[in-house]
Structures are given as structure tokens and as C-alpha cells.
Amino acid sequence: MKQYKFILSGGGTGGHIYPAIAIANELKSRFPDAEFLFVGAKDKMEMQKVPQAGYKIIGLWIAGLQRRLTFDNALFPVKLLSSLLQSRTIIRNFKPDVVIGTGGFASGPLLQVAEFAGIPTVIQEQNSYPGITNKLLSKNANKICVAYENLERFFPKHKMILTGNPVRQDLIDIDSKREEALQYFNLDPTKKTLLVLGGSLGARRVNQLIAKEILTFAAHNIQVIWQCGKLYFDEYKRVEENENIQIHSFIDRMDLVYAAADIVISRAGASSVSELCIVGKPVIFIPSPNVAEDHQTKNAQAIVDKKGALLLKESELDSQFSVVFESLVKDPEKQKQLGKNIKQLALPEATKQIVDEIVKLIR
């Protein structure tokens, strides 16, 4: 049997990296002898996260364009040319059967070279509003796996398959892990648990809000697991002197933390949204306004439109948070309905479906 070779590229944020790792893991389970190579951007988090997952990675000298005039912008053409030449060398030496891109600037040069060389390419778009890299690559890609409906205005319709986003398979059955979760996080089973997720690096405005609302949570007898992000951990760890609050820079056991949670406050990155659909808990989304094309608001709105979550913009937090939060906490029926509605939007077989499409291209 032929030994297949796959290159996966994507990065910059966890939202691009973790789907790529999930796809690689599923491919590996089907083709144990296959060879894998990841391509990312030098100095970005994929250079640590991918080797931790057991895969080899090469870093390109590439970065996105800034929205203002900077020295990095002036270097962009040089970086792009360097990355295209390096990508050509990687493709030539590795000879992949399929190249898979999950977004982020590193995937641009690599998939461009693969497409030019006639190697089958698959792109996986996590967001309801696609990034510029995937929009450019879509014209020549063989397949485009998407997580949201109605993306025809961005991508050729005949290439699109609605698969959903790859998520951790350990989230599929969290209800059975409730007891283990309460013990793992040393939680009081008689209290409701609020989980706060600000993304892998953290979210300044969300953190400021939680610090300000600590007394509100205490008044409702709520315990809090607060993932503040590594950039903010030193600033907020002193708050942990309050016995009802646990602060984490990063949470490894996401399956258990979701199992323990009764209500979730979260950013609306694509991976988080997909995970929360599978988990089926009541959610208040606070999208980051500092992302390209405001795609987090669009991700959250797609769920809100189907009555699956609540949405608060950062600009509304001071005036609206207490009202929205208290109305949710005091209404168990509303919590139940939101959890039920969001779960109906889940696409738990996403990783398997994406790999099915990749396999069609190698046979």
C-alpha cells in the first residue's frame, strides 16, 4: 500500500492550529503509516503547539499586513517572496499527495505553490466571514470545507461542503463526566458554575468585566472558573483569594471544564463557537471587535439568529451586562432552551467529513 504524505498549514491563532491538528489526527488514525508535515509562521504559537501534538513543523518568514503604515508592512513583499520560494522547496522535497490549509497567513504561499504544482488542495474555513487568505486560495482549491451556511458570495458554490469545524472528540459526551469534573476543579456541587473563556491569549475587556462583577456572582451564589489568558494571568491572579473564583491562564482539560459549567461567557472565535454548540450550555457571547472583518460578531450572530445564545457587544457591557446576566441566571427555563437550541446547531462529525473529502482526492 502506498505511503501517503500530507502537508497541513494554518496558524497565528489557536482557531487555525487546533483544527489542523484534529484533521491530522483523524488522517493518522486511517493511515497509520502516512507522513505528516506542518507549515506555519515563524514566531507564532503553532511553532510550539504542533510539536507538542507530535508533528514536525517548518516555519515560514511571513506575517499579515498591518492596518497602518509600519516597517513590517514595508517588508511584506520580501517576506512573501521568501515564503513562496521556501514553499516551493518544501513541496518539491516532501512531495505531498494533498495539501490542507486551515487559514492564517502561512497557508497562503504554501497552498498557492501547491495549486500551481497541480497538487490537490483542501481549505477549511472556520468562520462565517472568511479570512482574506482563504478567499484568495478558493479559486484554485479542489474542495472548501465550511462551518456556516450561505458562503456562496465568497467561495465557488460547487466546491463547498458544509462540514462544521473540527473539534476535540472528547467533548462529544461530556454529560457523563460531570462528577469527575466537579472533583477535578474542586467545585461545590450545590452551587452553579460560571465558565469564562477569553481565548488562548486572553481578552482584556472580558477580564475587566469579570473583575468588576465579582460581587454580582457572589450575590447569586455562583462559583467562577475564569480562563484569563497567559497575557493577563499575573494581573488577575490575586483575585483568586476569593474562594468562589478560580483563575487559570490556560485550561488543558476543556472536556471537564465544559462538563462542570452551567453557564458560559465566551469570545466568539470559530473553534469556541463550534465547541459550545456540541457542549450545549447556555452562552453569552462577547465577540472581540479587534479581528479582521469583525468576524467574531458574525459568528455569534449566526447562533443568536437561531435563538441559540445571547450576544453582548463590548460597547454594551457597562450598560447591559448586569441586566442580561441576571435575567439568564434567574430563568432556568431560558437556560435550558438556549442549551437545547445551540446543541441542535452542532456538527459533531466535522473532522470525519473533512477527512472523507481529503481521501477522495488521493484515490
Image: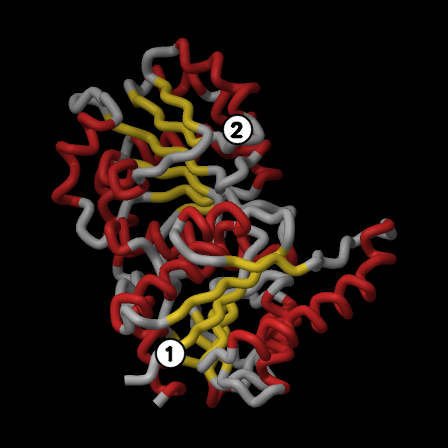
User: Which residue is tagged 1?
Assistant: 4
Q: How far apart, in angstroms, are the residues tagged by discs 2 and 1?
A: 45 Å
* Residue sitting at x 35%, y 72%: 34
Quarter placement of the N terminus: bottom left
Colour setup of the view:
secondary structure
Query: Total number of numbered labels?
Result: 2
* Residue sitting at x 87%, y 52%: 69
Q: Quadrant of residue 130?
A: bottom right
Please indicate whether residue 213 sits to the left or right of residue 176 in the image.
right
Q: Amino acid at mark 1?
A: Tyr
Pointers 2 and 1 in contact (C-beta within 8 Å): no
Q: In the rendering, which numbered label is found on residue 334?
A: none
In the rendered image, the vertical position of residue 37 relative to residue 301, given as above or below = below
User: Which residue is tagged 2?
Assistant: 207
Q: Nearer the viewer, residue 1 or 266?
A: 1
Q: Quadrant of residue 359?
A: bottom left
Counting residues from the start of the chain, the first of labels 2 and 1 encountered is 1
Q: Quadrant of residue 316?
A: top right
Residue 319 appears in view:
no
Give x and y (percent) for residue 208: 56, 26
Give x and y (percent) for residue 107: 59, 67
Q: Nearer the viewer, residue 202 or 208?
A: 202
| Secondary structure beneath label 2 | helix
Q: Amino acid at mark 2?
A: Asn
